[in-house]
Image: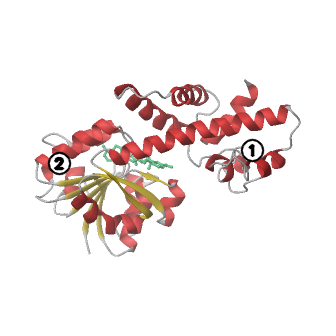
Amino acid sequence: MAKIGFIGVGNMGGPMAINLLNAGHSVKVFDLAADAVKACVEAGGEAASSATEAASGVGVVISMLPKGEHVRQVYLGESGIIAAAGEGTLFIDCSTIDVATAREVSQAATVAGKMMVDAPVSGGVGGAEAGTLTFMVGGPAGAFEAAKPLLEIMGKNIVHTGASGNGQAAKICNNMILGISMIAVSEAFVLGEKLGLDHQTLFDIASTASGQCWSLTSYCPVPGPVPTSPANNDYKPGFSAQNMLKDLNLSQEAADGFHASTALGHAAMDLYEKYVSGEGEAADFSGIINMIRKS
Ligand code: NAD
């Protein structure tokens, strides 16, 4: 059984760490929030007093942190975990962050004689709890193979997306499609309403015609057609509009840096910015239909 350090055990990291514990691994956890650590300790984990302590004396370190700045702070520098961890340690960063930071941190790990993959996820808190996440993994083949058995405990689809940073690239490209398609589906339902078209009728047509997409068939932004979608639960997240805006900011930052034309991605980011700064601050990302209806 592996000795694992787990840093950042919030909404996603907490259940991921608990799945590793349930599979019989030994897990040392660290988080700035004491409550988050407590839940893991109750499931059999050991509390570490710092990130560097969590990364010491283990073979693998997994992190699930909010943003690139947190990843840099935890990993880099003399007081970072790359310096603190033993030779040959495998780092798996599951946070959703910018591609440039993912590549810089992986490079620092390699220079220090350690292995690293960026392994952002899709599947949300439900997927983290059920151990059914999709992992998009960037990094050398050897590091991917070493990480895979642990990722298989926390997820169902484990995909090697190429070199370091490519896990983040896959994640932000996918979520750019998601943000754009949710707005497209929402605009279509609002136009349909104004034209006197019943929600279920439009759903039945579009879900079997060329308008078919995940935002429609799995996460429909109007209540009724897909009973499990947040629209049926007052747009409680789910996948928050804040997180969608974060991911759209990441894809736009990458598009600007690499001169990719993403006019719709940019428009989606602007609309989510407006939604999050108003009624959507605490809502699911599909709630953007309510702002579109009032526009
Ligand atoms: P969260 O805020 O619930 O958890 C992050 C945890 O990191 C918090 O408990 C926080 O205290 C801790 N933390 C922050 N800085 C730290 C530091 N320096 N040292 C130790 N701990 C620190 O967020 P989350 O929803 O679990 O998301 C984590 C990551 O997963 C984000 O990058 C997010 O974009 C991504 N993600 C989230 C979802 C989702 O549905 N929540 C889905 C896919 C991906």
Please provide percent x and percent y for residue 44: 36, 70
Q: Is residue 273 left or right of residue 227?
A: left
Pointer 2: what residue?
109
- Disc 1 residue type (three-letter): Val
Residue at x 13%, y 60% (from the top left corner)? 88
- Disc 2 residue type (three-letter): Ala
Q: Is residue 82 left or right of residue 14?
A: left
SS at circle 1: loop
Q: Residues within 10 Å of mark 2 (few under 14, many from 20)?
A: many
**Residue 224 visible in rendering:** no
- Quadrant of the snapshot with the N terminus: bottom left
Residue at x 64%, y 35% (from the top left corner)? 183
Task: Name the residue furthest right.
Answer: 196
When asked about the image quadrant of residue 289, the answer is top right
* Residue toward you, 52 or 105: 105
Please provide percent x and percent y for residue 261: 46, 27
* Residue toward you, 259 or 66: 259
In primary-sequence order, the first of circles 1 and 2 is 2
Q: Are marks 1 and 2 in contact (CB under 8 Å)?
A: no
Query: Height in image: 150 above or below 159?
Result: below
- Quadrant of the snapshot with the C terminus: top right
Q: Residues within 10 Å of mark 1 (few under 14, many from 20)?
A: many
Please provide percent x and percent y for residue 239: 56, 46
Query: Height in image: 255 above or below 24?
Result: above
**Residue 136 visible in rendering:** yes
Asked if the residue at label 1 sits under 8 Å from ligand 1, the reply is: no
Q: How many marks?
A: 2
Residue at x 62%, y 27% (from the top left corner)? 278
**Which label sits on residue 222?**
1
Q: Is residue 109 left or right of residue 137?
A: left
Please provide percent x and percent y for residue 92: 29, 55
SS at circle 2: helix
